[in-house]
Image: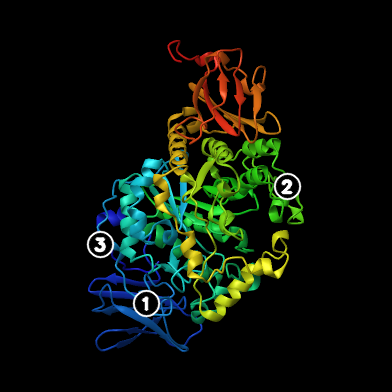
Amino acid sequence: MFPGVQLNSRVEEEWCGQWRPALGAWIERDGARFRVWAPETSKVEVVLFESTPRVIPLERFHDDTWGGYVAGVRAGDLYRYRIDQGDFPDPASRFQPEGVHGPSQVVDPFSFPWTDQNWRGRQHKDLVLYELHVGAFSPEGTFQGVMRRLSYLRELGVTAIELMPVADFPGERNWGYDGVDLFAPARVYGKPDDLRRLVNEAHRLGLAVFLDVVYNHLGPEGNYLPTFSSHYLSKAHKNPWGDALNFDRESSSMVRRFFIENAMHWIHEYHMDGLRLDATHAIIDDSRVQFVADLVTRVRESVHGRRTFVIAEDHRNLNYMVRPEGEGGWGLDGVWADDFHHEVRVALTGDREGYYRDFEGSMSRLADTLNKGWLYCGQFSDYLKEHRGTDPTGIPPRRFVFCLQNHDQIGNRAFGERLHHQIDHAAFRAVSVLMLCAPATPLLFMGQEWSAGSPFLYFTDHPEELGRCVTEGRRREFRHFRAFSDEAARQEIPDPQAESTFRRSRLNWEETCREPHLSMFRLYQALLAVRCAEPAIQYAEAGSFRAFALSESTLLLRQDAEGGPSVLAVIQRDGSAEIDLAGHPGLERLVSTRCQVILTTEDPPFAPDPLPPRIEVARVAPRIFFQRPSAVLLRAWTESHAAPSDRS
């Protein structure tokens, strides 16, 4: 890293460990230090936009970076780099106040008055992730808008928010996966210190903050990295979004340095608790040490005194991604395990097109997924036309991230329908128990907890010509689906470029004050409280749980604790049913006559039109009479830890 960088306090020294910024512009003494990688240019100058513009030549270093100290520069000053091709924003700009094509701004990250010095992060076993889009989460559509609702999220019971990408992008609205200024928070969401205030307040309230970052491609508009070096993009690999990034060919060490520097930047300059790496299956790297593994190692080595997580989105079900480095793995803390989502959606909606063709929606396969963490462990995928997955045996359950909704699974549908838009609320309540009480790490998508009425559509704000291509491409993606086989039907798919598409995707918080949304919120709040309080759900170790298919529509999940009661979740997917658990192996060693009902999803607080199942627990084994889709949570003791006689 670049020598001589000064931190402004002992606290920052403790938080940042051995990390120092190495690229971009940072305040140092009475000026600023600049550094940029530009190996193919003959001269680099920094142009400062003062009352009288200054142009200062930079020195070339042995690694083909250019840098130098410039006296008199202050936080807030604007600048560009002048190279052979013209004047351009800094590839490592900390802020772009005038947009992705404008000048960069000098930012002093260490002048922010942090008050989270005693924050050490959340334990892995306590993580409940809440994914949100900053622009669509609140009416304000800003970092401050999110901050104002942190108390609500704490009251709900989640323990970590996961921000969709905030790196600056072209236009006024975007999902964030077309980011091009990877170090600069999007100016439409607020200033850098607004994001820091959000993180600082989250920590005060006991909430961790994760950030979604994109290291597999760059957006098509405003991407100036190739202007500074053609080596940023791979000449050997392509991914679904165009040119892959160069992590394994000529000059790839400097490309890796840039993106690992970006990860460090979010962890240290913004005190992020974790990163979610987007689509790591699209990071193509033939190196001996994979970029993702390298990033995890470097992040871990740089952090002292607090828990920091790195999780990945990856559909390949590769066990080595989440195995420890000492066992030859990449050391990731978790991976999105989409098989659970897919199996649930097929079970409840009957979807069988696209990648859903690989899933049956049967209770037996859903139980298998719960027991293993993912369903595909090397079986042939009809959708991919290849074998998919590896053996997950021995992977701690919390390293699998389960969801019923996320931005992809909603937003990649033509009309952005959420799961609860397609099924009745009783069924949604039932499967919510399964997701929130499973031993995996649960992830909620914003508004899910109150069954939000708003869709989450795909939206962009590109220049006219590019925008037209995006709209046409979006509609063309659905041509293989029966519902959109003709052109007229495809024209009904919302235009990503229309501002109305974005506005429809914004949460309507007025819903939280009326039914059926209030009841759903109370259920989610209660389930998260149960998750936090029950030792059997908290324990979540290999061998401590087992799922069983009781019938074609009923599933049992048993979880045990060391020295405490077990928890049984019985989920009825559809229709009415009578379930008698007498003699079932799922109750082995339990004192069945001492079972207690924790809750049902049809209890009056959770259902505007309650229709609770009848439960007989004072028997040889519980018997449950379901009247419609619902779930029952029971507490039970083993023979060696029988319940006290005064408990009912």
Q: Residue at x 50, y 16 (%)?
A: 641
In the image, residue 159 sits, relative to residue 69, either above or below, namely above
The residue under the point 65% across, 70% down is 237
User: Which tag is nearer the camera, tag 2 or tag 3?
Assistant: 2
Image check: 647 left or right of 194?
Answer: right
Q: Give neighbour class at mark 1: few <14, some 14-19, many 20+ (Cα, 10 Å).
A: few
Nearer the observer: mark 1 or 3; the answer is: 1
Specify whether residue 130 is in view: yes
Task: Name the residue furthest front.
Answer: 609
111 with respect to 181 (left or right): left
Q: Position of residue 542 (x, y in %)?
A: 58, 33
Instruction: Provide the residue designation for mark 1.
Output: 98
- Circle 2 residue: 378
- Amino acid type at circle 2 is Gly
The first of marks 2 and 3 along the sequence is 3
Cα–Cα span, label 1 and label 2: 49 Å
* Residue at 29 percent of width and 67 percent of height: 108
**Residue 176 seen in the current view:** no
Helix, strand or loop at mark 3:
loop
Query: Where is the N terminus found, in terms of image quarters?
Result: bottom left
Kindly report which numbered mark, 1 or 2, lies closer to the viewer in this rendering: 1
In the displayed orientation, state which residue is furthest to the top: 645
Residue 596 or 28: which is nearer the viewer? 596
Q: Could you say whether the residue bearing mark 1 is in a helix, strand or loop? A: loop
Q: Which quarter of the figure has residue 282?
A: bottom right
**Residue 518 x %, y %:** 43, 41
Label 3 sits on residue: 8
Within 10 Å of disc 2 (Cα), the crowding (few <14, some 14-19, many 20+) is some
